[in-house]
Image (cartoon, rainbow, N blue to C red):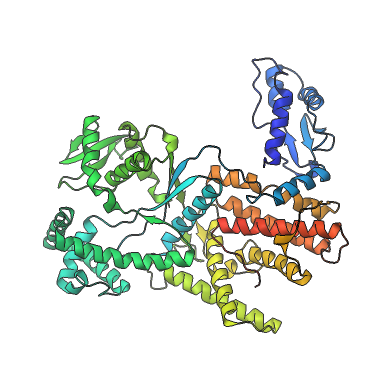
Amino acid sequence: MVSILTQLNDHFAQALGGQFPPDVTLPTPLVVPASNPKFGDFQCNIALPLAKQLGQPPRAIAIEIVDKVNLSRICEPLTIAGPGFINLKLLPDYLGEQLIKLQQDQQLGVPLIQVEERVVVDFSSPNIAKEMHVGHLRSTIIGDCLARVLELRGYDVLRLNHVGDWGTQFGMLITYLKEVYPEALVTADALDIGDLVTFYKQAKQRFDQDEQFRETSRQAVVSLQAGDAESIKAWQLLCDQSRREFQLIYDWLDIVIEERGESFYNPFLPGVVELLQEKELLVEDNGAQCVFLDGFTNKDGDRLPLIVQKSDGGYNYATTDLAALNYRLTTDGAQKIIYVTDAGQANHFAQFFQVAQKADILTDPSQVVHVPFGLVKGEDGKKLKTRAGDTIRLKDLLTEAVARARQDLETRLTAEERQETEAFKTEVAQRVGIGAVKYADLSQNRTSDYVFSFDKMLALQGNTAPYMLYAYARIQSISREGGIDFAQMASGEIILTEPTELVLAKSLLQFADVIETVETSLLPNRLCDYLYELSKVFNRFYENCPVLKAKDPQRRSRLLLCDLTARTLKLGLSLLGIPVLDRM
């Protein structure tokens, strides 16, 4: 199904093709959504830029364009406003025809890509021997949302979890555990994950203060990298324990992701150094092998180096990232790689992308994109932490969200004098609590910091997940009350006579364009904004237009509008990783 905006642009392009001198360039796009609904649904504003090229008044050009374009089946007669703005208002009958097509389309108008393309989405990326904390929330759910949108469009998406499972920290942790809790290095789950994290912090403190311990830790890394059996077993036990803890979080959040940690690329690191040597990019600096960067300088104005091999022979994150990039482009066959990390890593990505281009690992800059995001802040405006000043564990955050959702539900049930089963209450609390956390995050522009507030995100009013879930549940209540199975409803004529019906129809037909916007901008909040507006528009329609009490064919028409709204909300929320509820 072709979106209305695409249809209009195609009509204008065909009508205006060859109408102007060859040296005149038509601006694009030719048609855009109207800036103010009172002027219509769409606008063509090209007369003004064409006026400069043609040396004619823009209004005269607008009149010529209107004469050439025939949209009698789609729009009311085109009007011209101001100096040459062409306004387009869609016909109700045409809107009804488009809605019937939408109803018969499982994709709800979202087209599949024409040529299969593989995209890697690199997201979440926690560190082994550490618990996932609130800082991992944004990468995990933003990355998942983008992957879901791309999958809907038909991309072959490889979801990768680039976990920190290699390097100096393991030599440090293994060395420390040999002293204080050796059983953890030979027995699965000998330690609780929280205790393991505590030992990790103690090991780091010791590493920073004790030169002998630091040297022993480095030797432990060498043994690990050399494949020493005892070291490998200890490392695997620590990794397996952390993985199980991560999976609990991923199950709660309904995240599907394939782990491929830093250790996976370890065999390829020497090859990266050799390649950079062959390209004559390496420069030795204080015993380290470096690539000096363009556009990155220190306070003295000297070019900064990107270290790819340390003076002791070890490798840096950048070396692993270069190896991973090369593997994903060549072996995985990725046409694009999307990295979802905090904004603080922007310089790192700019630097390693530059080196990858210099080394011809990356032949097209458009193949990679860094998707940065801001901080999660508390209501005091500072970085979200516990009262003790520690980073909040993601497990605790989600548990509290579900508990608060359960409490809100219990209060509402008491007020409404409703009796529900334990299974019902558990499901509603889980979906509302987790959904509220996800939506509160995704509804923000990801490039900005945002303030975390349980009270705001769990509210039944406003731009929240509960508001959207309630709109969906309201439609299902119409189904139950009327004894109607939407899935079995045959297509029929959709009649649009009331203002709120027309507004709802137009909103439903915008879904495909919104998905395209999210795909190109990689901004999930655009989808959230749309779903919020759709929910508000539907609620106004519901308040003004009787559905079950209407007479056919109006009753059937409005039921079809309800069904389309529910399907759009369900699909849209699923792209955010939020399952709907038939009852709340």
Q: Quadrant of residue 329?
A: top left
Image coords of residue 23 (percent x, y): 64, 15
Apparent side of residue 451 relative to residue 33 in the rendered image (left or right): left
Q: Quadrant of residue 580?
A: bottom right
Apparent side of residue 238 relative to residue 492 in the rendered image (left or right): left
Q: Is residue 48 shown above or below 394?
A: above
Q: How many marks?
A: 0
Q: Nearer the viewer, residue 449 or 88?
A: 88
Q: Is residue 447 visible?
A: no
Q: Is residue 467 shown above or below 519?
A: below
Q: Residue at x 84, y 64 (%)?
A: 546
Q: Residue at x 65, y 58 (%)?
A: 569
Image coords of residue 539 (percent x, y): 75, 62
Q: Residue at x 32, y 60 (%)?
A: 127
Q: Is residue 304 visible?
A: yes
Apparent side of residue 23 relative to residue 484 in the rendered image (left or right): left
Image coords of residue 332 (percent x, y): 37, 43
